[in-house]
Amino acid sequence: MPGRNTIGLLYNRNKKTFSFSCRDFYEKGFKFYHNGKFYRYSASLPNKESLEMYPIPSEDGVRGFTIYNVGIMERNPKDGKINLHTV
């Protein structure tokens, strides 16, 4: 929504895949809209801080760590479809 910014904590949990343990992620981030594009930036909380605030929910889980997470969404003016660009 134009003129509004969001700052918050994000939580994501992935199921166990093949031989990898399930992973969960706690990230701090912000989002904003500018010149027709929606921007999203986030990075993991420091491991010690995230484990103290939010323990891993199961014994077989592993806390994942995101160095940075960037995404830009915009609508294609030709066909109206939404394009998502991630890094």
Image (cartoon, rainbow, N blue to C red):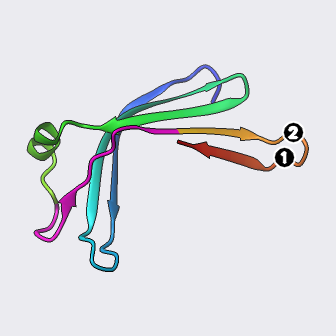
Tags 1 and 2 in contact by the CB under 8 Å rule? yes
Three-letter code for the amino acid on which mark 2 is drawn? Pro
Numbered tag placed on residue 77 in the rendering: 2
Residue 10: x percent and y percent? 35, 44
- Which SS does the magenta portion mostly show? loop
As helix, strand or loop, the secondary structure at mark 2 comes to: loop
Report the residue that reaches farthest toward the bottom: 18
| Mark 1 lies on residue | 80
Asked if residue 75 lies left or right of residue 9, the reply is right
68 relative to 57 in the view: left or right: right
The number of numbered discs placed on residues in the rendered structure image is 2
Identify which residue is drawn at 51% across, 24% down: 5
Nearest the eye: 8 or 67: 67
Q: Position of residue 72 (x, y in %)?
A: 61, 37
Q: Within the image, what quadrant is residue 53 found in? A: top left
61 left or right of 87?
Answer: left
Magenta residue span? 57-70
Image position of 59 with respect to 33: above or below: below
- Residue 11 horizontal/vertical position (percent): 32, 50
